[in-house]
Image (spheres, rainbow, N blue to C red):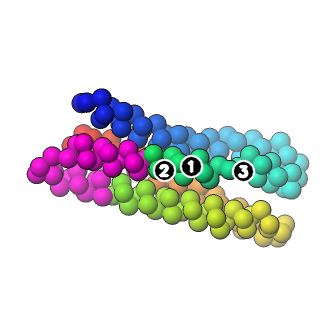
Amino acid sequence: MTVLDLALSVTHVLAGAAWFGAMFYSATVLHPRAAVFFKTNEDFEAFIMTLSDGARWKVLGACVLIAGSGIGLAITSWRSPVPFGWLALVGVKVALLLAAVALFGYTSWWLWPRRVFATAEDLPALRRTYWLIVWTLLVLVGLNMALGVAAHML
């Protein structure tokens, strides 16, 4: 393993872990604890909105690091002939990352603004959709990381 391979691997793993960890913490600690702390939905929503302001760019930056370092790893570890299993795993990883980024984009640019301006009647349905997306993203990103380990072992 070269220094470049090591740097790309560390960047790839840390960027993915940061995204997964931030989502996991938000879903399992931050939101549940904040929901108990705030007495009204309006106060809770104001807190979450303030806390989340500007986060989309940090997440997208992590996604760029994940994709860029993944491309770099694919290039530096390319060997001929390419093992079909490795190629299949990397293809699935790319598809999972694209799906996760698309779902994040949908949440960030469509669902989140709707939540900001939601009426009290609309908020429960938007929250249900939000939580479905959060857990879906955790599965997509977690599975992507597990497939990365499997691909590395081939």
Residue 39 numbered mark, or none = none
> Disc 2 residue type?
Cys
Q: CA distance from mark 1 to mark 2?
A: 6 Å
Q: Which residues are magenta?
A: 66-91
> Looking at the figure, which quarter contains the N terminus?
top left
Q: Residue at x 53, y 40 (%)?
A: 18
Residue visible at 39% across and 48% down in the picture: 68
The residue singled out by tag 2 in the image is: 63
Q: Of residues 58 and 151, which is closer to you in this image?
A: 58
Disc 3 residue crowd, few under 14, some 14–19, many 20+, Cα 10 Å: few
Q: Is residue 149 magenta?
A: no
Q: Secondary structure at mark 2?
A: helix
| Mark 2 crowdedness (10 Å alpha carbons): few <14, some 14-19, many ≥20 | many
Prevalent SS, magenta region: helix
For marks 3 and 2 on the same chain, the one whose residue lies earlier in the sequence: 3
Give the Cα distance between marks 3 and 1: 12 Å
Q: Do tag 1 and tag 2 residues touch (Cβ < 8 Å)?
A: yes
Location of residue 123 (image quadrant): bottom right
Disc 3 residue type (three-letter)? Asp
- Report whether 103 appears left or right of 154: right
- In the structure shown, which secondary structural element does the residue marked by tag 1 occupy? helix
Give 114 or 131, whichever is nearer the viewer.
Answer: 114
Q: Secondary structure at mark 3?
A: loop
- Residue 79 belongs to the span the image colors magenta: yes
At horizontal 64% and vertical 64% (from top left) the residue drawn is 109
Residue 57 coordinates in the image, percent (x, y): 60, 51
Seen from this angle, which residue lies furthest front? 4
For label 1, the residue is 59
**Residue 23 on image: x %, y %:** 59, 46
Residue under label 3: 53
